[in-house]
């Protein structure tokens, strides 16, 4: 299974990707996570990416496409993978089409008001888990015990820019994948377990 998750910032892509990848035993490839790891390590890619991410803008296509192409060429992606946060532009989707055959594009639908609330209350762990202050009231990770933190790009002004970028550059991909016949929409406003069950159902139905 070769999966893509679509959805606005804060829709729950990362949250669901962790669970879906555990269930199907496939690698979770989040371009956002890869870029943030590079920023933390101070690599040249990280230095370049930070300038864009801090403004809520997309990192240039050629940079991200190269990154994903290299990652998908690795052995652990042969039997399947889940892409979270890629593709994000039509250019990226077309490039991906040249080096992978996507079997399911799952669009996690959540309205703008709710994504703003989700992002504002999000707390992250360095192990990749994310929490929300509405249902988690500790400042350490339940999985690994590390201290939780807020993402730099989760500030109000940056979130606004990210949502604008999503509407202009990423939302058109819903139509792109609908036309290739692999799109499924899932109601992401439901509680987490229900969203998970719906995602599993559309993946299994399509298989
Ligand atoms: P990226 O890291 O991909 O961020 P994003 O798309 O903005 O999405 P988020 O990670 O903010 O949201 P999510 O959908 O994963 O939500 P989550 O599960 O955490 O990208 C960051 C930046 O990197 C971009 O702005 C760009 O600059 C750059 N970049 C990355 N990929 C790129 C690409 N391909 N091209 C160019 N640039 C790229 O959930 C959010 C919150 O809600 C959490 O607190 C969670 O606990 C809570 N929550 C989730 N589901 C539920 C639920 N069902 N009920 C209640 N709470 C829930
Ligand atoms: Mg995410």
Image: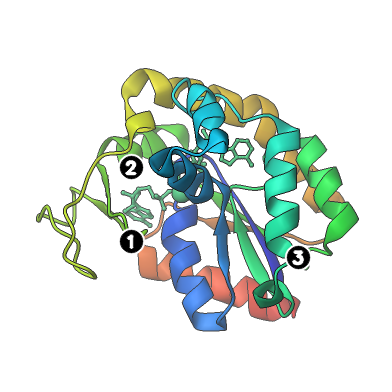
Q: How far is disc 3 from disc 2 in space, using C-alphas?
A: 34 Å
When the figure is inspected, residue 39 is found, relative to residue 141, above or below; the finding is: above
Q: Name the residue under label 2.
A: 118
Q: How far is disc 3 from disc 1 in space, using C-alphas?
A: 24 Å
Q: Nearer the viewer, mark 3 or mark 1?
A: 3
For disc 3, the neighbor class at 10 Å (few under 14, some 14 to 19, many from 20) is few
When the figure is inspected, residue 160 is found, relative to residue 43, above or below; the finding is: above
Nearer the N terminus, badge 3 or badge 1?
3
Q: In which quarter of the image is the N terminus?
A: bottom right
Q: Mark 3 points at which residue?
A: 73
Q: Is mark 2 within 8 Å of ligand 1?
A: yes
Q: Where is residue 85 in the image (x, y as percent from the top left)?
A: 58, 47
Q: Where is residue 161 in the image (x, y as percent from the top left)?
A: 49, 20
Q: Position of residue 88 (x, y in %)?
A: 67, 40
When the figure is inspected, residue 173 is found, relative to residue 124, above or below; the finding is: above
Q: How far is disc 1 from disc 2 in space, using C-alphas?
A: 19 Å
Q: Is residue 146 left or right of residue 32?
A: left
Residue 207 visible in rendering: yes
Nearer the N terminus, badge 3 or badge 2?
3
**Res. 127 mark:** 1
Q: Position of residue 29 (x, y in %)?
A: 58, 59
Q: Report which quarter residue 42 is drawn in.
A: top left
């Amino acid at each position: 299974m070769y999966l893509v998750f679509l959805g606005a910032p804060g829709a729950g892509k990362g949250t669901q990707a962790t669970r879906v990848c555990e269930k199907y035993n496939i690698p979770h490839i989040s371009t956002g996570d890869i870029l943030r790891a590079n920023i933390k390590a101070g690599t040249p890619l990280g230095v370049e990416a930070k300038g864009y991410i801090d403004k809520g803008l997309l990192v240039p296509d050629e940079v991200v496409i190269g990154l994903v192409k290299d990652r998908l060429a690795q052995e652990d992606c042969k039997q399947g993978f889940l892409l979270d946060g890629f593709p994000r532009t039509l250019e990226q989707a077309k490039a991906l089409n040249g080096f992978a055959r996507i079997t399911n594009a799952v669009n996690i639908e959540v309205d703008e008001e709710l994504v703003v609330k989700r992002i504002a209350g999000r707390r992250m762990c360095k192990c990749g888990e994310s929490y929300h202050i509405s249902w988690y009231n500790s400042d350490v990770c339940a999985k690994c015990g590390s201290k939780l933190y807020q993402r730099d790009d989760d500030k109000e002004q940056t979130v606004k820019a990210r949502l604008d970028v999503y509407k202009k550059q990423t939302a058109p991909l819903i139509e792109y994948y609908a036309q290739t016949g692999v799109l499924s929409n899932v109601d992401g406003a439901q509680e987490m377990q229900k969203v998970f069950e719906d995602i599993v159902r559309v993946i299994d139905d399509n298989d």
